[in-house]
Amino acid sequence: MSDFQKACLIDDIDAGTGVCALISNKQVALFRPTKEAKVFAIDNFDPVGKANVLSRGLIADVKQTLTVASPLYKQHYDLATGQCLEDDSISVPVYEVKVENNEVWVKA
């Protein structure tokens, strides 16, 4: 089990967008849906498109589930669970995140 690693400052993530960070040699997609200091972390690798692109996806509310839409084939991934909404057999890893003193920390 790994420890939390500093990914960035909260202000490095504009509200409503995502960024990519390298944590323990993994590309992690970080999303800040609102101006609040709440951040979600999922794997950056899109298992359908076979590319590290999820951090460039659009945040969306799909049936009251906060998701990111892959920029490649538009599958929606639940930001809380990593589950693909269009295909129950597909999911992406989710990572624990904490924000302390305006710093974003990820456990991956």
Image: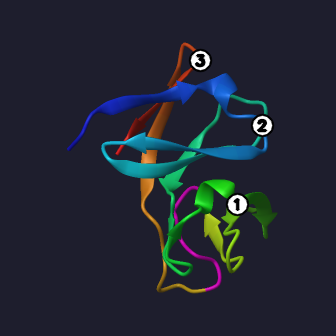
Distance (Cα) linking label 3 and label 2: 14 Å
Distance (Cα) linking label 1 and label 3: 24 Å
Identity of the residue drawn at 47% across and 67% down: 92
**Which residue position is annotated with label 2?**
15
Q: Quadrant of the N terminus?
A: top left
**Which residue position is annotated with label 1?**
57
Mark 2 Cα-neighbour bin, 10 Å: few <14, some 14–19, many ≥20? some
> For the view shown, which residue lies furthest in the top direction?
101
- Residue range (magenta): 79-86
Q: Quadrant of residue 39?
A: top right
Mark earlier in primary sequence (1, 3): 1
Q: Are marks 3 and 2 in contact (CB under 8 Å)?
A: no
Point out which mark residue 102 bears: 3
Mark earlier in primary sequence (3, 2): 2
Mark 1 Cα-neighbour bin, 10 Å: few <14, some 14–19, many ≥20? many
The correct choice, above or below, for 45 with respect to 22 in the image is: below
Q: Position of residue 52 (x, y in %)?
A: 52, 63
83 in magenta: yes
